[in-house]
Amino acid sequence: MFLEEDRIPEAIQHGFLDLDEQMINDEGIKEEMSGTTAITVLIKNNVIYCGNVGDSRAVSCINGIAMPLSFDHKPGNELEQKRITEAGGWVEFNRVNGNLALSRALGDFAFKRNNTKLPKDQVVTAYPDISSCELTKDVEFIVIACDGIWDCMSNDEVVNFCRTRLQKRMEPEAICEELLDTCLSPDCELSGLGCDNMTVILVLCLLGDSMDEFYTRVSRTIPESEVKNPIKMCTEVAPTVSEDEKPPMVFSVTDTDDKTGEKEKSKEGDEEK
């Protein structure tokens, strides 16, 4: 229904929550104490949509500059901490109830047992943030990866790593392999940086270009002037509803600059601690 009506953000939101509901009703899964991050990128009608729970991440390269399509869900973030405490949880050592390092995930059903709260308002929720961006030839590629990559390299480092190799006309598969090798610790007997699981996908935004034309486009000089961030965050603006009624999902669009500011403040607070 949502896809047919081009209500893409709502389709992604419902998809995440419906999957989580199916998992909790699955006899083989519902008693599991673990969970998973989840991130998806959908391109439809020349618009990029990204849905995210947890700290896997999607980052676009726009005119040679790294611009995130998602933001990590950490318990120390102000809005995340507010939901956690209102649902009866707490944040200790930047972890949910002193345990979980993420504040949104599929699974982790031990943190989703408040019967007075909707699924999106649980201590840990599978309710994703959604961003969108027009797909133009300014968008060169998108990197989608789990936290094992982002723990080792920043957004800028990953984008520069991929872009310099694309300029040398390396195949995307080879770039991904080299990126994984770069992040992987030489000794994983002890847990630590570079020992986490790692997955990465490199999406080239050809938009009808031949590979030669794409390589020319990705070799453009990075603009010296500031590039406006075209990515928008979709935010819920639905009115309060009764507890026995699922909330309508209505969205407005806001600049990511506002969202980025919130996340950066939370990050700075974490670092000070």
Image (cartoon, helix red, strand yellow):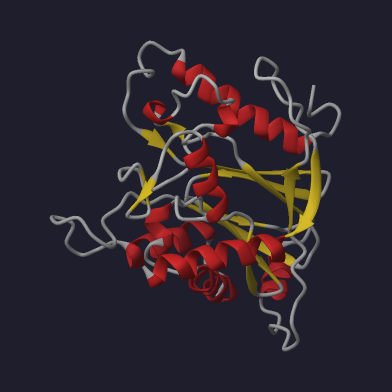
Q: Report x, y in % for residue 165.
A: 52, 73
Residue at x-position 54% and y-position 76% = 164
Q: Can residue 49 be seen in this snapshot?
A: yes
- Is 184 drawn above or below residue 75 in the view shown? below
Q: Quadrant of the C terminus?
A: bottom left
Q: Quadrant of residue 130?
A: top right
Q: Report x, y in % for residue 97.
A: 34, 41
Q: Report x, y in % for residue 244.
A: 66, 14
Residue at x-position 56% and y-position 27% = 119
- Is 3 drawn above or below residue 177 in the view shown? above
- Is 191 drawn above or below residue 272 in the view shown? above
Total of numbered circles in the picture? 0
Q: Quadrant of residue 153?
A: bottom left
Report the front residue among 58 and 213: 58
Q: Quadrant of residue 194?
A: bottom left
Q: Is residue 214 left or right of residue 84?
A: right
